[in-house]
Amino acid sequence: MAAGGNAFEIVSKGETYQFKPDFVVIFNEKDPEIALKPSGLKKVPYNIPTWKTTDNRLADYSQQAVDASVAGDGFDDKILRSAQQNRTANIYHAGTTYFLTAIKAVSAGDSISYTFPAHPMFTLKAWLIKGLPYPKVRFLFTPKKNGFYSVGYIGAPSFKSDSTRELWQPLIWTEKRTPPQPYLTPSFMTTIPATLVNDGHNSIGVLADPKYLPFQPLPLFTNSQFGVALLNHKSLLQSQLFAPMPGGVNSQMTAGRAFEFSMNLVVDSASITKTYEKIATTVFGFRDYRTNATVSMNTTLDNLIDYSKTRYAWFIDSLKGFAYSTDVPGAVKNVSSLNPLELSIIRDDKEMFDKRAYPLMEFMLSREKFLFAIDSNQKIQSPSRKLRGPIAPLSELQVLYNVFGKNNSFYAAMAKKEFGTTRIRNLDEVQKGKNWVNAMYMFKLTSDSSYLRLSITLADKYLQERVYTRITQFGDPLFSSNFFWPTFTNNWSALLELYELTGQSRYLQAAQDGARHYTLFTWMAPQIPDSLVTVNKGGKAPMYWYLKSKGHQQMYYPEETVPAWRLSEIGLTPESSGTSTGHRGIFMSTYAPWLLRIGYHTKDSYLMNVAKASIVGRSESFPGYHMNTERTTAYEKADFPLHEHKAQSVNSFHYNHILPMASMFIDYLVSDAYVKSDGKISFPSDYIEGYTYLQNKFYGAKNGRFFQFENARLWMPSRLLQIDDHALNYISAKMGDTLLLAFMNQSGAEVNTRVSVDLSRVGFAGNTTIHNLHPSGKSTFLKDGVFQLHVPAGGMAAVAIADVKIPTGFQDQLLHAEKDHRSDYADIPEGNTKALLFKLGSYAQKLFVFLQEDDTKWKKATISYKINGKKEMSMDKNEYPFEFTIPIEMDKPVSFYLKLTDINGKQIRTKITELGK
């Protein structure tokens, strides 16, 4: 590092970068009324700071009208629909600008002091202090006139966009997507408080001092002390920092009262994601910081699934879906039938299958969109009332086809049709059927190698267009627009799937690249203090403004003082580009297992630490959706979700997230066992595609390896184990008369504890030998289902308990499927009716019949049926949707016909249809 003239020079990788002592002061005599407004960017919703201006020439902000579909949790009408006129989003138009550059630089030891020309409005002093990991710039600003001020540092190196490799401004400007104007990102929206430019050699930026982004109170727009920008007034890429924001906190200044701020100058010989990691770890102290706070993840999983079966989880049986009333009154929304199906299998849970998995299987094959509303006038988030399915993505059809022994031919037929079509499943996002991801699942469905060749060909093209070439626009080859974070990166979860299928390292490398870019959306600030924080003051939990506006009741939780790390959002992401201003950190961190596996395969410990930070020790049951107004322990508590909808006021509840969260926990537990065993515990998986960011692996239908046991089956019934130390998570499996257990220590200390096995689940005969699989060692003995266990710090232990009795259960019935080629699907012209005969292993078979035509044509439907030629029975449906579910004796045929009454009272009868012959 050296001083070149008045500029400070940093040399890295043979390149010299000059940081000049250049500043801009923005002045307003009156409050410029800073306010967040929609950016108006095409293909991406996002809110940006704007300011009122009296100069019409500077009033450059314009916004398109927001339609009725943009509403619900996280969308703020004060932002979306308030007055927009006479405003600017350009930080350089936010007031009168005064540009300054130092006229003198004096070096003294490790510092340089800068002198600026005299000015009638203010005085400015600045110092540069050399140090590690980055040199620091400090300025002292003293106004001579009352008013609203902002001081911007604009001396960092600048670049033309076509001469850079990559850029980053939180939250949405990643890769080579460039802000169209000098937009400001308020500090509360900075995952780290910086912007960066990579010129192909180094990453260069300006980073705010962490003390100006404190842990308490929770960062919000109203307490943001600064903002960062990337595009300057000359339309060049330049890392800039403005403190305070014009019209923001601390910006109203009194003559003679000084304002101080400091920042770091960043030059790092690494990519942007590596520089982001370095700043996170060296400046903000990010590390493996979490452990199970109050209970194990297994206890959380048990509590969460128990909750999912209560009325508080608001599953509406008649509509076969979870209420979506937080956003869309009267609607239901589901994510995937694979979440409850996985839980049914792994947890040996017949009730979960009957009450959740099977109804969702019907929903996913019949509905047109994930969001279903009977009310045709409902426009929020663009629901559908049509039965024009399947809504299940092709990958889900493939999994269902394989899980049930390929006996339900309609899954394969639907999948082949979906591959050749285009569909809107969620919101207004258009999805094309023929792409490399779906081709991969068509191969898994058909074993036709031509699909795999097509997947590889299209995926390699995707690598060239989307991975090796940094994207410059919003939208990409797989997503027509951007909203949720997975659409901003490459499709790294599917790339990991393709790597695991083909073993081709280029897909793993691309997945790692996408995963590391995803971490740009995970909070790495504010820094976690090594202290205690008091929350729920006065016995009141925080009141989320959105729910308060809808008449929700105040919640009460005892005031308590807890370590700050338990309250931290570090490792979580905001919900999306459009709702990031209100949803600070969401608990649906479905990316965690993917980061963990990619980190393991690529030896990327940073990804593994982010994975753990996002999921471990955050709740004892379903925690609701997000952090939003202030820090609290309310969502940690086991009873937090056990309230009626209007009695929830801390955060929003999206009931369709409950079962995906359970899958997320299972995926993380199984992945953690895989990683900590160095691959010696490995269970084959399928893919739960869902939508938005709700992707996870699907386990349970395929046997796997558990150290030397090569044909083990995951078997994790509720509360199978009682462990005295909650630092341990576990997975369990069975193989014949052997129970297999793996324990993963989430803490940085070794654990010596007692483990009890539920004797109602597993039978023992006297003293039973326990074989230590890992770490290997001498065998121990178990008596009355109890044994002692040692697990090293951050490590794992695994045992096998032989000669026990594990009764045959529901899991075995559902997965037992002998080949069955009987007919299972029919199209009926009247009512555009579909009939499906579900063959569900050796457990059950069910007939599902639904009309695609609705109550604009029909007012009543009756089905009459005979099972195995026996007595005829009938069912009526007098309101839409017109659908019927009929249990059928195992392996027996069914014949049926419909009587349909139209809206004018005219009745027709269909021909007799036979299935199961």
Image: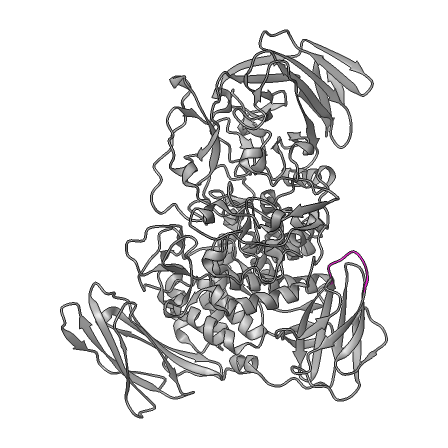
Find the residue positioned furthest to the right.
778
Q: Range of the magenta residues?
A: 745-751
Direction from residue 556 to residue 907 in the image, left or right: left
Give the quarter of the image for residue 422: bottom left
Residue in front for this viewpoint, 187 or 165? 187
**Horizontal and vertical percent position of residue 674:** 69, 64
Give the quarter of the image for residue 415: bottom left
**Horizontal and vertical percent position of residue 155:** 63, 20
Q: Quadrant of the C terminus?
A: bottom left
Residue drawn at x 45%, y 55% is 435
Direction from residue 329 to residue 647 in the image, left or right: right
In the rendered image, the vertical position of residue 10 relative to residue 904, given as above or below: above
In the rendered image, the vertical position of residue 713 relative to residue 613, given as above or below: below
- Structure colour scheme: one colour
Find the residue positioned furthest to the front.
538
Total numbered labels placed on residues in the image: 0
Q: Looking at the magenta stretch, what is its main secondary structure?
A: loop
In the rendered image, the vertical position of residue 384 relative to residue 808, given as above or below: above
